């Protein structure tokens, strides 16, 4: 059975357009989420590893995207009820943007999936400074 995971991360930026680019474009996503990302309409392909050698490829369908708000995708290999979503929002208190991540994991994969998202955000901070 899938279990919903909701995580929140504060970013070090006040630029909504920069955050939107990082979560909604192939150029932005490949900076922190995968080694390569290609989008063709509502189809997204994510590649981890060297495409010319051993690599892992997964495809997803963009099921919902609202500019400067969120992007929701469904892995093509997952069940119909599960999805993953990256939502951006502005904190009035600190003035910075935050990312709210929603994802689904099997009960025994919960900690591993949280660790993957933590590593992705760490990569985002290191590579972009955001």
Image (spheres, rainbow, N blue to C red):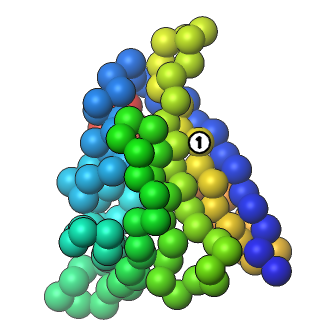
**Residue drawn where x is 51% and y is 49% of the image:** 86
Give the farthest residue toward the left: 52
Question: What residue appears at the point 60 percent right and 9 percent down from the top-left corner?
Answer: 93
Determine whether the residue tagged by mark 1 lies in a helix, strand or loop.
Answer: strand
Residue at 52%, 87% in the rendered image: 77
> In this rendering, does residue 102 appear at all?
yes
Q: In this view of the protein, can residue 116 be seen by the observer?
A: no
Locate residue 26 relative to residue 5 in the image: left or right. Answer: left
Binning the other alpha carbons within 10 Å of mark 1 as few (below 14), some (14 to 19) or many (20 upward) gives some
| Residue denoted by label 1 | 100
Q: Which residue is drawn at 56% across and 62% down?
A: 84
Rendered image quadrant of residue 10: top right
Q: Which of 59 and 32 is in front in this view?
A: 59
Percent coordinates x, y for residue 65 in the rendering: 41, 52
Q: Residue furthest top?
A: 93
Q: In which quarter of the image is the C terminus?
A: top left
Q: Where is residue 7 in the image (x, y as percent from the top left)?
A: 66, 46
């Amino acid at each position: 059975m899938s279990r919903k995971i909701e995580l929140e991360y504060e970013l070090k930026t006040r630029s909504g357009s920069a955050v939107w680019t990082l979560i909604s474009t192939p150029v932005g996503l490949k900076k922190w989420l995968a080694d390569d990302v290609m989008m063709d309409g509502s189809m997204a392909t994510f590649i981890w590893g060297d495409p010319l050698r051993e690599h892992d490829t997964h495809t997803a369908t963009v099921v919902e995207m609202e500019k400067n708000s969120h992007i929701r995708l469904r892995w093509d290999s997952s069940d119909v009820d599960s999805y993953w979503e990256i939502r951006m929002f502005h904190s009035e208190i600190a003035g910075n943007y935050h990312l709210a991540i929603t994802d689904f994991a099997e009960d025994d994969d919960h900690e591993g999936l949280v660790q993957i998202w933590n590593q992705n955000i760490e990569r985002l901070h290191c590579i972009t400074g955001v």
